[in-house]
Image (cartoon, rainbow, N blue to C red):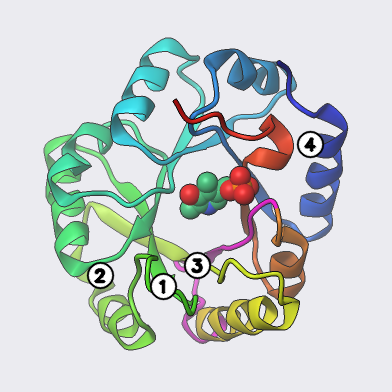
Amino acid sequence: MTINQPVYINILEDCARFNATLVAVSKIQPNSKIQELYQLGHRDFGENYVQELLEKQQALPPDIRWHFIGHLQTNKAKYIVPFVHLIHGVDSLKLLKEINKQAAKANRKVQCLLQVYIASEETKFGLDYTEAENILQQKNQFENASIIGLMGMASNTSDKMIVKNEFEQLATFFKKHFDPQVHHLSMGMSGDYLLALTSGSNMVRIGSSIFGFRVYQ
Ligand SMILES: *Cc1c(COP(=O)(O)O)cnc(C)c1O
C-alpha cells in the first residue's frame, strides 16, 4: 500500500497557485504511508483522534506539524496541547478556555481555528456565526490560545451550488474578521478542495485522495 504520488503533486500545485497550505489527513492510515509522504518533504499532517495522534506523535519524526482536525473533547485537550501545531476544531468557549489553561501549564502558545458550522446537516460540530463573532471579540483575553483563523466543513452533497454557497458565506465572514492574527481559512477536503480554494480557502485538509480510502477496523 502506497500513497498516490501523482495526485499529491497535483494537489500541491493547486495549493501553490492559491497560496494555500496542504494538511495531509492521515487518520486511520498506517505510519508507513505518513513516512512516505514525509520523505517527499511533507510536514503538515492532520489527525482526528487523540489516542491515535499520541501514538503517531511518539513513533514519527519530531518535526512533523500535527494538526488536530477532529472534535476535541474538553477533558482531552491536555494530552495534545503540549505538542500540537494547530487545533482546527475549536467549537466552544469552554474548549478554548481549557486549551488556554493547559497551554499556560505547558508554557506555550497554542494556535487554534474556530470551527464554524456551515453545513445543512445536523451531525456536524461547530459554532454558528453569532457565537463565532462573540468569541472573536474576546480573543485577546486568551494569552496562551491564539485564534489564527476559521475552519468549516461543507455539506456532504454532490450539489456543487450548495457547497459553493456554504464556502462563500464562510469566506465572507472570514474577510470581515481578517487581521494580522486571524489569517487562516481551513476549508476543503478531497472531494471539494478546488471549490474551497476558488471560494477563498488558504488551508485544505485532504486525506483519501492522497492516502487511499481509510480501512476502519
Ligand atoms: C477526514 C477529514 C478530512 C479529510 O477527508 P477526505 O475526504 O479523506 O479528504 C478533512 N477534514 C476533516 C475534519 C476530516 O475529519
Q: Is residue 178 magenta?
A: yes
Q: Residue furthest front?
A: 217
Find disc 4 in the rendering and name its residue: 8
Judged from the image, the secondary structure of the residue bearing numbered disc 2 is helix
Mark 2 touching mark 3, by CB under 8 A? no
Labels 1 and 4 touching (C-beta < 8 A): no
Residue found at x 32% / y 24%: 54
* Mark earlier in primary sequence (1, 4): 4
Q: Secondary structure at mark 1?
A: strand
Query: Is there a contact, CB below 8 Å, between mark 1 and mark 2?
Result: no
Label located before the other in sequence (2 or 3): 2
Q: Is residue 41 visible?
A: yes
Total numbered labels: 4
Q: Amino acid at mark 2?
A: Asn
Q: Which residue is mark 2?
A: 140
Q: Amino acid at mark 1?
A: Val
Find the distance from the CA under tag 4 to the CA under tag 2. 37 Å
Foreground mark, 4 or 2, reads 4
Name the mark on residue 213: none
Q: Nearer the viewer, residue 41 or 129?
A: 129
Residue 206 seen in render: no
Label 4 close to label 2 by CB (< 8 Å): no
Q: Is residue 18 above or below residue 52?
A: below
Q: Give the alpha-carbon distance from disc 4 to disc 3, as whole Å.
A: 22 Å
Q: Position of residue 82 (x, y in %)?
A: 26, 32
Residue mark closest to the camera, 1 vs 2: 1
The residue that disc 3 covers is 152
Q: CA distance from mark 2 to mark 3?
A: 22 Å
Q: Earlier in the sequence, mark 4 or mark 2?
A: 4
Figure quadrant of the N terminus: top right
Position of 155 compared to 195: left or right? left
Q: Is mark 2 within 8 Å of ligand 1?
A: no
